[in-house]
Image (tube, coloured by chain):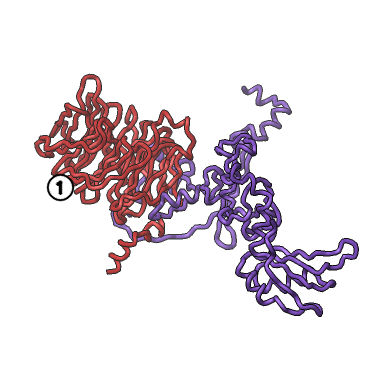
Chain colours: A purple, B red
Amino acid sequence: MSAKVAGREWAEDVSDNEANDPTAIPAPVTTVNKDGTKTTVSYKIDDSGRRVKVTRKTRTTVHREKVNPEVAERRTWAKFGLEKGKSKGPQTDTTSVGENIVFRPSRDWKSVQAAEAKEGGGKAEEKSLKEQLRDKKVKCRICSGEHFTARCPYKDTMAPIGGDNEPAADPMAEDGEQAPKQGGLGTGQGGYVPPHMRKGAAANAGERMGGKFERDDLATLRVTNVSEMAEEQELRDMFERFGRVTRVFLAKDRETGRAKGFAFISFVDRAEAARACEKMDGQGYRHLILRVEFAKRTT
Amino acid sequence: MRPILLQGHERSLNQIKYNRDGDLLFSVAKDKVVCAWYTSNGERLGTYSGHQGAVWTCDPSPNGILLATGAADNTIKLWNIQSGECVKTWENPTAIKRVQFSEDGSRLLAVTEKRMGYLGTIVVYNIQYGEDLTQQSDEQDLKITCEESKATVAGWSYLDKYIIACHEDGSVSQYDSKTGDLDSNIEIHEYDTSINDIQFSTDKTYFITAGKDKTAKIVSARNLEVLKSYSADTPLNTAAITPRKDFVILGGGQAAMDVTTTSARQGKFEARFYHKIFEDEIGRVRGHFGPLNTIAVHPQGTAYSSGGEDGYVRMHNFDKSYFDFMYEVEREASRK
């Protein structure tokens, strides 16, 4: 041993000064700052053998409390057992301060907890159906616009995107929730069902052709004696005063692009159409007097 | 609230106890060491060494002079709290699971384990507080033998009138503390589920039991009538009644052997707070890595500590939100 100390290798010398030797740690240095706080710089070796510098800033506040004389006396007792001879105050090896814990008692703690768990990124499957739908945007099944299907301006003129025998203007279907049910895929078990086997196929079979026009006719006005220079937009503006106009059709000459002299205006509501018919019949428009009547049912 | 962590033990905690003024906390664990702590700052006052086995239980005397401990080395020891010296050792045939001083400190009961052909018993010693604390009588003042089901924990009721013992089969017994006669035995927890803890209210007229059947019950000491019941989702190891606020604190967790197979999140290693009257769960305090073995509440109700299977004691001082919390009916009652 003594021989080794005498004849130290240069390599050992280096390693001794480094982290491997616990005695190489400098003693903690405590400095008192101007504002009364203390800064303690100490070094320790962590689990993986690296030397760590610990800078701890402490502020001492004196907190006075009146206690029972017995309690006060106990504070002056000498330490014993494993603590014998140790300095006053908590020892860092046995006492430490934990992280702050927020404890707020609440009456219905269980439900609050459940709600928090959901907010905290619970899996989508765990969320209720209602919550899933909360953020969902309304989407029209006819034109994919952001409105209910029943409010679609094209609902009388366009077939739904899905394109099957779904009743396009069914107001009950506006939520989108019921779409799969009404998609008519029979048992709802998934898998392909041929169109003629689908639910309601027999009932809808023959109606498809005329169906669209039939609905159209209920609230569609035929406007005649329209000026050649008429524009669709102008007609729409005129008739929109009476209600929601879903379609304006102005017949135009294919070659000249001029209006042929008649137009069809479709309303959402038949009552609105009736009022428009009453008011607009006999109105002047571009030096001509309009004639407005309900469109005849096409057969 | 910021808990103070006490790391004086290397193994799981068995019991922690405040002294009557609440300025000292005693903790015992499976590692033979008994620790005393100042509750104000978490400083360790000292350790009491002498036990040769896991220390199951401890109790400071009401006058703050003696500390009784019971251990798996079949001994009950009395310690001078101030000096840390052992002043008396009583040998027993089996391990000691619970010790408790009577309300006036003149008697000490100890629950002994049923093992090696010995039946579980509750023994009572008289305690002297003279000039020489080592002058204690070797004689047992009373010995109650539990023939049917061994007692797991026991305590003194109001005015030291009864000894209340909880049994392994889920029943509670009331013994006359003078004669040792069995007054009544009532099954309050599910049959064949042991009762792991008993703690009394400040006036000792009622107590709370923590059962393995996942419930805790408040029972009247006079007639063993179940007054309140609190159900949890995990076996309970400990239960405490808080003075000042009408709460109870329950602690538990799954059995120690199952701990490593479950994560801390679902491990239920939290102290559960229930409203004492309404029996609702009102909150939890997390922090331990293992099941809670023992909970003690400061005698003034300003703090509580918990000891866990993880070897830590966590001392919590309640903050304002704890004291402010009231049910609507309580608030109305306090306004009147």
Q: Which of the pair B86/B269 is nearer the observer?
A: B269
- Position of the C terminus of chain B, as image quadrant, is bottom left
Crowding near pointer 1: few (<14 within 10 Å), some, many (20+)? Answer: few
Q: Is residue B56 left or right of residue B264?
A: left
**What's the amino acid at mark 1?**
Leu
Confirm whether residue B250 shows in the render. yes
| Horizontal side of residue B68 vs B267, given as left or right | left
Q: Quadrant of residue B219?
A: top left
Residue A85: tell me if it is visible. no
Q: Chain of mark 1?
A: B
When the figure is inspected, residue B20 is found, relative to residue B288, above or below; the finding is below
Give the left or right position of residue A202, taking residue A128 as reference.
right
Residue A72, x across and y down, in percent: 33, 54
Judge by depth and name the residue closer to the eye, A180 or A272.
A272
Can you name the residue that lies furthest to the top here?
A: B117
Badge 1 marks a residue whose secondary structure is helix
Q: Picture quarter containing residue B116? A: top left
Q: Quadrant of residue B214?
A: top left
The residue depicted at 32 percent of the width and 32 percent of the height is: B55
Q: Where does the image place residue A23, in percent across and percent down from the top left?
A: 60, 35
Residue hosting label 1: B159
Residue A197 lies, in percent from the top left, at 60, 37
Looking at the picture, tell me which residue is in the foreground, A215 or A191: A215
Residue at 58% over, 53% down: A173
> At x 41% / y 32%, what residue is drawn?
B11
In the displayed orientation, state which residue is furthest to the right.
Answer: A255
Q: In x, y percent, where is residue B61?
A: 24, 44
Q: Nearer the viewer, residue B308 or A199?
A: A199
